[in-house]
Image (spheres, grey):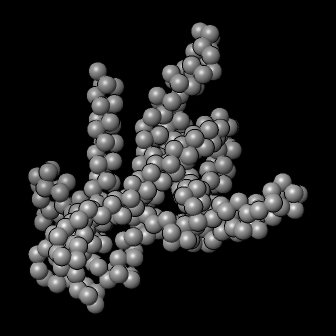
Amino acid sequence: MSSWLPTNPSSRRWLGLAPTYLVIGIFMLIPMIIMGTYSFMEANPYGGVKPVFSTAAYLQLAWEYDLDGTLVFNPGYLKIIWRSIGLSTMATVICLIFGFPVAYYITLQPENRRNFYIYLITIPFWTNLLIRTFAWIIILGRNGVIELPLLSLGIIDKSLRMMYSDGAIAIGLTYSYLPLMVLPIYASLEKLDFRLLEAASDLYSSRLEIMTKIVIPLSKPGIIAGCILVFIPCLGAFIAPNLLGGGKKLMLGSLVQFQFASARNWPFGSALSMLMLAVVVMALIFYARGAKKRAAGAES
């Protein structure tokens, strides 16, 4: 029955991975090729693209045509790009500040309790992201959960204006993707040999030294993985910027959505998507090189 199977081990390996290659090619590679192709075409005023080669979409990232047809520098979209990178970095750092202690606390618990705490961490994923973001409007909004008690007690006499700001967007992103930081760090800390901590304590190491010289270095793979898992979706998020930013604080994800849905500038939306893809690829290359160096160091 298996006479039709190749006898060469490499051929068998390729045949076993063929379904994976097929899925990646259809649902990942082909859409990326289409997106990259669209980014080098002209926009159709009514949506779609014209099959004419053009680099106008990439020029639009930093330039625009003046009334006399000359190119002039326009930093508007660059500001959105830098705001997206800055807010994504801020959300990643906040997630790391709160996520690492939570993961470390879970690791210190007895084994029969760890699964329960991990279960609690994953509960937010049971609710739609749109509903969770709307909840923050009630919390941060005018006369909301935070403002109303402060106004009633006379602590403040006017609105804090927390909504429609970079801070509100950062809070929404942090809340949305905090579990993605906790889980990889916990996976690294779970493998930690706590006898190393006991030995360091017996050698009169302080808690700070134990944390900075043992715990954090050994959990670095989980920290890097968590940062990548948080930074990448934050960079492409558009629900939190649209709802908590009120459309005034655009990020790359909401700008791409606007180009395809309202502006009908598919080439520019594709160019922005290719830009986000480039940032993601650079982050993954950074992680892969770091993992390769750590593996080489462990072997030596």
Image quadrant holding the C terminus, namely top left
Image quadrant where residue 38 sits: bottom left
Left or right of 158 on screen, residue 185: left
Residue nearest the viewer, comparing 92 with 115:
92
Image quadrant where residue 151 sits: bottom right
- Residue occupying the point 42% across, 41% down: 224
Image quadrant where residue 134 sits: bottom right
- Residue occupying the point 73% across, 63% down: 159
Residue nearest the viewer, comparing 99 with 42:
42
Left or right of 123 on screen, residue 50: left
Left or right of 100 on screen, residue 156: right
- Location of residue 146 in the rendering, given as x and y in whole percent from the top left corner: 76, 60
- Location of residue 272 in the rendering, given as x and y in whole percent from the top left corner: 30, 66
**Residue 34 seen in this snapshot:** no
- Residue occupying the point 33% across, 48% down: 283
Residue nearest the viewer, comparing 217 with 79:
79
Instruction: Judge whether 192 appears above or below 74 on screen.
Output: above
- Location of residue 298 in the rendering, given as x and y in whole percent from the top left corner: 34, 25
Instruction: Judge whether 22 appears above or below 91 on screen.
Output: below
